[in-house]
Amino acid sequence: MAVDLLGGDQAPAVVVDGALRACQADPALSLLLVGPTEAADAVLAALGPESRHRVHAVAAPTGPHGHERDISSVESGVRTAVLAVAQGRADAVISAGNTGATVTSAALGLGRWPGIRRPPLAAVLPSAAGRIVLLDVGSSVDPDEHTLAMHARLGSAYASVVHGVSAPRVGLLTIGTERGKGDRLRRAAPAVLAGLELPGGGRYVGLVEGNDVVTGAAADVVVTDGFTGNVLLKGLETAYALIGSPAPQPPLPRAAVLLGVAGTVVVCHGAASGEDLAAGIGFAATLHRRAAVPAIADFITGPAGRTPEDPLSARGGHEQ
Amino acid sequence: MAVDLLGGDQAPAVVVDGALRACQADPALSLLLVGPTEAADAVLAALGPESRHRVHAVAAPTGPHGHERDISSVESGVRTAVLAVAQGRADAVISAGNTGATVTSAALGLGRWPGIRRPPLAAVLPSAAGRIVLLDVGSSVDPDEHTLAMHARLGSAYASVVHGVSAPRVGLLTIGTERGKGDRLRRAAPAVLAGLELPGGGRYVGLVEGNDVVTGAAADVVVTDGFTGNVLLKGLETAYALIGSPAPQPPLPRAAVLLGVAGTVVVCHGAASGEDLAAGIGFAATLHRRAAVPAIADFITGPAGRTPEDPLSARGGHEQ
């Protein structure tokens, strides 16, 4: 797992804490820590010499002024982590840095799947009726209806592959289910969504509202633009952290996965705690071990089933 | 209180229930029930003959097909209720009907204050640090930055007048506090908001995020477009109803007040329960008794202090 030590409001301290917790929680995990080597040394020192083989450090190139907290240097952390995945030296990237920089680095460094304009970030929220996939939560601002349609396909594939939902119900987030409600984008999108074939037997169930993301009664996947999704995600996550989860299930990682690039990329909030970072690293490892991203890629870009001859298998294999 | 019996997903039954609960909770309240007279009869029968003077009925004109649940008839409920306020036969309107129809009816029937393009709906949410005014929650979709600036002024006036907050902190809801984050609207708005004089000594405190609406730590008033505000409101209200409030305070009415029209107009959700309707009616009565709407109007359209000579006093008086 390539971990960006420079991303996050309290980097690198909080990332060091998260990396340490992740290693302690999962003895099979090994980390490539990207950024100041002192930070990697701190993780190693805390883990003890018997874990030396599990923690590797790589410096991130410094910016024009030589300060690691330069804007360009901060972004160089995630760029270097992405490069490590592209070169096969790591299996996944985890960053709590600037979302835009992470999405751009991943799109350029790993490549987008055909048909993907702006890779969305998918978050998973607890609901009274089970897990909800909410996307996009911060990558696509001011998208058009065709971008929302791709979010719907990616979300349906994710619910099928990662959550094992058969025939995921996919809803479009809006502010009322009467005809003509919503903004320009939400008035244009239903016509595109209604005609869509969704992966994993997914079904477009029409318009849903903010309350449906909490009850989970109407949909397994909720599609929206990155602005609305980010605001709702941060509101609900904070409410659940403060008051309690709406579902009697283990807490879900407060991290989002980038869909539509050829690699596993997990994004934590800028304000993520060490615990959040550790959960994000563990989440990335689980996605990688289950080969979730290549399986979702097959749904979006390939034939219905992946065969050994399929070129996607080679790409999938490259990531593992 | 002019109550629209035809508005809401389960009208008129749920509105009848709400009207009855409101009368039982507040012996000083009297209602003008707009819609089927049988519904008004049901409220009267339940209250008993000694309450006859408190409940009045007025029919809403039926639509072209004579069915009271025609689209046009449903909207005629709120139009008739607005007319009653405009004519001085009622002091406030309460509707759980279509938001767009209510806003349009109120703007046409009561008149907008000078400078108001699209009157926003302001909701009040509990937060860990106290009440938060969130606006708009469903009236202005696709607004521009100048409409958001008016939301900021109205919200600051509301927090000052209704919540008694001195120097309200007013924040702009977005998805990250780094420069350049957010969509087109959120990149354009800060320049307009930063130069604004806000009523009640309000201060623009810059960008806030979804989590700040839950913690209440950053702002007393949170400004956004009606789409994002509606999604966040419905998400958080449902979370709080399911799990509990983030604050140890009495529950707040799940209703929003329309700001920028010359009258007191309270909107409940289409899915409002009888309890929600009763809370909305009680909320409207409180706003009216405190002359909140005229006081907010003074902040927006008049000189700093209202004098007996001020023409706004006459308009305010008309509403009382």
Image (tube, coloured by chain):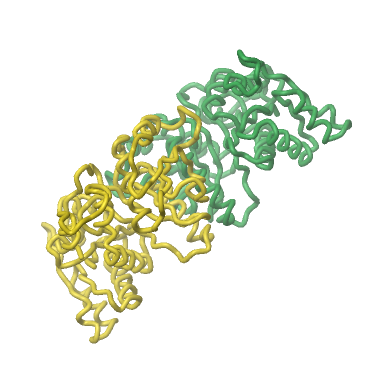
Chain colours: A green, B yellow
| Foreground of the two, B46 or A243 | A243
Residue A309 in sight here: no
Residue A219, image x, y percentages: 46, 48
Residue A87, image x, y percentages: 67, 17
Residue A24, image x, y percentages: 79, 40
| Foreground of the two, B285 or B40 | B285
Query: Hey, which residue is sitting farthest right in the picture?
Result: A50
| Residue occupying the point 41% across, 46% down | B222
Residue A156, image x, y percentages: 50, 38
In the image: residue B48, left or right of residue A294: left
Residue B19 in sight here: yes
Give the position of the C terminus of chain A as an image quadrant: top right
Query: Hey, which residue is sitting farthest top in the picture?
Result: A64
Give the position of the N terminus of chain A as an image quadrant: top right
| Foreground of the two, A81 or A216 | A81
Task: Give the quarter of the image for residue B8.
Answer: bottom left
In the image: residue A95, left or right of residue A302: right
| Residue occupying the point 33% across, 47% down | B199
Q: Is residue B214 above or below residue A9?
A: below
| Residue occupying the point 31% across, 48% down | B154
Q: How many marks?
A: 0
Q: Is residue B297 above or below residue A17?
A: below
Task: Give the quarter of the image for residue A11.
Answer: top right
